[in-house]
Image: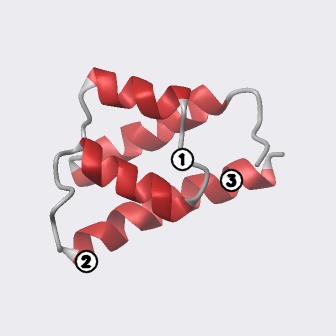
Amino acid sequence: MGYRDDLDSDVQRLLNELCIKLGFCLPPDESRRLQESPPGDVDSFTDAVIEAEGLGDTTDTDLRRQVRTVVDQHMSRWAAGR
């Protein structure tokens, strides 16, 4: 899947929104890892964020849905910008 050249900035904006809106403020190493090699689809990115936040074992489907909604909004914009 091809992305625009400023994917690092796009991912950073996504992570910033997750931090501000949902309290998913990832440690710098995890944030950098996602910026350098972001998962290519909405569900994988959502799972990576939840795992990076240390909630990989959570079964809170409402929380996952909220994270997924933000991820989907951003990734849809990325695809539109190609």
Q: What is the number of the mark on residue 61?
A: 2
Query: Label 2 amino acid?
Result: Thr
Query: Between 12 and 21, which is closer to the camera in this rendering?
Result: 12
Farthest residue, direction bottom: 61
Q: Residue at x 34, y 48 (%)?
A: 49
Name the residue tied to disc 1: 39
Q: Mark 3 or mark 1: which comes first in sequence?
A: 1
Residue 22 sits in which quadrant? bottom left
Query: Label 1 amino acid?
Result: Pro
Residue 32 sits in which quadrant? top left
Q: Residue at x 29, y 42 (%)?
A: 19
Name the residue tied to disc 3: 77
Farthest residue, direction right: 82
Q: Residue at x 47, y 52 (%)?
A: 45
Q: What is the number of the mark on residue 13?
A: none
Q: CA distance from mark 2 to mark 1?
A: 20 Å
**Dot in front, 2 or 1:** 1
The colour style of the image is: secondary structure
Q: CA distance from mark 2 to mark 3?
A: 24 Å
The spot of residue 18 in percent (x, y) is 34, 48
Query: Label 3 amino acid?
Result: Arg
Assess whether mark 3 and mark 2 are in contact (beta carbons under 8 angstroms): no
Q: Mark 2 or mark 1: which comes first in sequence?
A: 1
Residue 55, visible in the rendered structure: yes
